[in-house]
Image: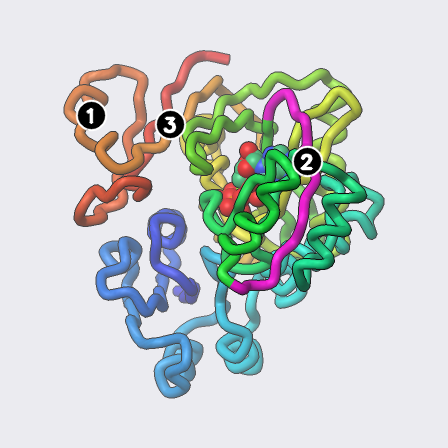
Amino acid sequence: GACIGILGGGQLGRMLSVAASRLGLRTHVYDPGANPPAGHVAERVTTADWEDEAALRAFAASVDVITYEFENIPTATLDLLESLRPVRPNRRALAISQDRLTEKDFLTGLGLTTAPYRDVPDRAALAAALAEHGAPAILKTRRLGYDGKGQARIMAPGQAEAALAEMGGADAIFEGFVRFTHEVSVIAARGLNGEVSCYDPGENVHEDGILRTTTVPARLAPGQHMDAVLLAGKILNALDYVGVMGVELFVTPKGLVVNEIAPRVHNSGHWTQAGCAVDQFEQHIRAVAGWPLGNGQRYADVVMENLIGDDVDRVPALSREADTQIHLYGKGAARPGRKMGHVNRVSRG
Ligand code: ATP
Ligand code: MG
Ligand code: MG
């Protein structure tokens, strides 16, 4: 059978491996970490560095197609892999989402609404952005941020200096504060032949910058629901995308504002495991392997709750709940902020 190469062996890579295996496909996970969660289920795992050319060549030679579960793959690594095997989703999707500035330029270029933003190459640019937009605002590193890391809120102009210091010298972007009523995301997929399938938007609640719960159905008027799905399709088509993407949105009285896109399966799409015949992991594998997409239709109401840090101590109690699907990632120590697993609580829609 065909073999899927997966860059990154965290929980997303693990659940992709499970999905591939269910389809009779093999997986080879590449992750420089010591004991990647996906390594327990993949047929093969390579734990060499991203710079290890011999290991990367051997990896590529062993697979038919390469995909990834995180955005921050070094450029040189991709250059090499791309010359050896198809990489899906494509390079442009990855490059755009690796940099919040490029990402916002791309999104606004499509006619979509984002938070007002400014490039902040230096202190003067921050002062100018603040003078123009005022506080509150958020300063974010352009690259490498996740789970709210690499961000600083500016509640008053006097906090600009401290926010800049938190960027640690990294290139930053200024974002005006969006006054949203709630946050939703669309998990969307596009196949090799260009077909698009979107799951119902989920409503997301964050705590300390980390996703806490996703609830479907989300609170959205029918028009907003349609806007969300259409804009996700627009993004995928513009990128000639193949695979699953997470599109994070702010819901405001004036309409939907795009927060960010993730060119991969997404934490806010875990509910699909309990709500749909074909979940986001199978959907992604189908897409990158060139299979027809599954149906994104939702058959149940679901609340997904992340088990973060000590939350994992609740598993014995959770295991006694009748309609709760439990997913544990096989990670070692439960450190604060570490995603250890999640549960999907299902009820009839
Ligand atoms: P993820 O783990 O989703 O990749 P991240 O570190 O990339 O997160 P963002 O999604 O940019 O961070 O921001 C995290 C959260 O902070 C958002 O979900 C939202 O709650 C809040 N936030 C971010 N940007 C803004 C903004 N411009 N206005 C208001 N709230 C914001
Ligand atoms: Mg992000
Ligand atoms: Mg986010």
Amino acid type, callout 2: Ala
Residue 314 numbered mark, or none: 1
The answer to whether residue 120 shows anywhere in this view is yes
Q: Give the residue drawn at x 57%, y 58%.
A: 290
Q: Amino acid at mark 3?
A: Glu
Reply above or below: 185 against 56.
above
Q: Secondary structure at mark 1?
A: helix
Mark closest to the chain's N terminus, 3 or 2: 2
**Residue pictured at 60% horizontal, 63% vertical:** 171
Q: In which quadrant of the rendered view does residue 228 lie?
A: top right
Q: Which residue is mark 3?
A: 305
Q: Earlier in the sequence, mark 1 or mark 3?
A: 3
Tags 1 and 3 in contact by the CB under 8 Å rule? no
Residue under label 2, please give it: 135
Direction front: furthest residue: 158
Mark 2 or mark 1, earlier in chain: 2
